[in-house]
Image (cartoon, rainbow, N blue to C red):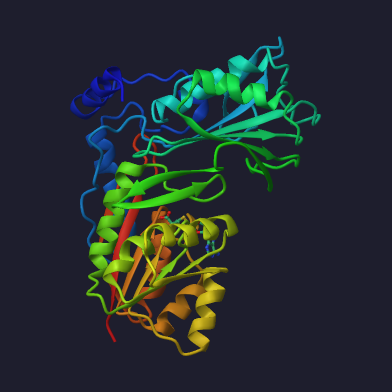
Amino acid sequence: MTEKTQNASKNVREKTSSLFCPADRKCGGCRYLKMPYEEQLKLKRERVAKLLKPYCKVSPVVGMEQPLHYRNKVHAVFDRTRDGRIISGIYQEGTHRVVPVDNCLIENEKADAIIRDIRGLLKSFKIRTYDEDTGYGLLRHVLVRVGHKTGQIMVVLVLGSPILPSKNNFVKALRKLHPEITTIIVNVNNRQTSMVLGDKENVIYGKGYIEDELCGCTFRISSRSFYQVNSVQTELLYRKAVELAGLAGKERVIDAYCGIGTIGIIAAPQAKEVISVELNKDAVRDAVRNAAQNGVRNISFYQNDAGNFLAGMAEDKEKADVVFMDPPRQGSSEEFMSSVVMLAPKKIVYISCGPESLARDLKYLTAHGYQAQGAWPYDMFPFTEEIETVCLLNRTR
Ligand code: SAH
C-alpha cells in the first residue's frame, strides 16, 4: 500500500470522507463514498439488525483499519470512444456504456496499473477492442486477481475469438512492465452475454492459477472459481465462523457452497470429517488440490447442487453435527434447508452476503427447530452498501 493510500485511509476513518472519484455518479458502486467510515459501519449494522430483529442480536460490524484498495479481483471492460480512443473501465450502472476508470479507490492499485498498461499496449499490437453490437474486434475484458499474501498475480484476457496475435511478444511486453504477473490466461467469450468469462481457456503464461493464503492454509484459485474479494476481512470472517462451530475433533461437518474449499479445509483439523459440496467444476478441482496441498485428508468434495446433494444425504438417513453454509447472494433453497433439518446438525453456521435472503432463510430455519444465537457482520465491501454476516443457529429440539 502506498503512503498516499495509507494517509487517505486514516483520513477516512477520522473525519468525514473527502474522497473523490471521477466515476462516482455513473458507477454506482461506492454509494457511501462521502460518508465517514465509522458511519458506514453504523448504518450497515442498523440494516442487518432491522432485518434480523425477529431472530437474534446483531453485533457491531467488524470494520477495516485501511478501508481502501481492498479488492483483490479487478475487472475492466474495454471499448473505444467515437473518436477512436481506447478506454477501459466499468459499465455505467444498469447499462452497457463504458465509464473510463484509471484508478479506483477500492480496487487493488497494482491491478489497476496492469489494466492501464494493457490499454497502452493495444495499439502497438494492433489489438482492437471488441464491439458488443457488431461482434467485431478482439479484447472484451481484462480480469486481474492478486494473491493478497503471496503477491502472485493472474491476468485474464477475455477475447471475442480465440487467437491473440503476437501472443508471445504480448506476454513479453506485459511481463516487462509487470514482472510480478505470475500467470496470463486467454479466455474466449464469443457470446452475447453479460457474463464476463466464457467457457474456453488457454494458459499463455505460467501455471493458469494463483495461490493465496488464508488462516495458515494455502489456496489455489483459478479464473472461474469464486474467491472472496477482500482477503483481510475474509480471514477474520472465517476465523469467526470456525470459532462459532465450536469443534472438538469428533464432528461430522458439512461445508455447503464450499467454493475452492476454504472453510472446510480450515475447519478440518478440528473435526473428524468434512463433506464439502459445490456446483462449479473448476472450484471443485481447485478444492481437491487445495486439500492435498494443505495435507488435509479427512475431507471429501462433491460437485453438485447443494440442495440436491443434501436431499440425497437426508434420504439416506445420514446425520451431521455441524453445517457451514455460504450460499450466493440470493440465499439458499427450501430443498437445501429442509434437508439440513433432517440431517439435524446441532449447529448451523450461516455465512451470508445478502442480509435480506439471510433473514428469509432464518425465518425457515427458526420455524423448523433452530434458534439463532447471534449475528456478526463483517465489512467486506467498504464504501459500498454490501455487508457480509455470519450467523450461528443451534438446534432446539
Ligand atoms: N464458501 C466459499 C464460496 C462462497 S460463494 C468461500 O468462502 O470462498 C458461493 C459459492 O456457491 C460459489 O462458489 C458458487 O459457485 C456456489 N454455488 C452457487 N450455487 C450453488 C448451488 N446451487 N449448489 C452448490 N454451490 C453453489
Q: Position of residue 24 (x, y in %)?
A: 46, 24
Which residue is more in the foreground, 298 or 97? Answer: 298
- Image quadrant where residue 126 sits: top right
Q: Is residue 38 left or right of residue 318?
A: left
Q: State the residue lying farthest toward the bottom.
A: 317
Q: Quadrant of the N terminus?
A: top left
Residue in the image at 26% along x and 18% along y: 3
Which residue is more in the foreground, 14 or 186? Answer: 186
Q: Position of residue 347 (x, y in %)?
A: 30, 74
Q: Is residue 132 left or right of residue 369?
A: right
Q: Quadrant of the C terminus?
A: bottom left
Residue in the image at 29% along x and 67% along y: 269
Q: Is residue 381 left or right of residue 243?
A: right
Q: Please say whether residue 267 is visible from this viewpoint.
A: yes
Residue in the image at 22% along x and 70% along y: 246
Residue in the image at 39% along x and 37% along y: 384
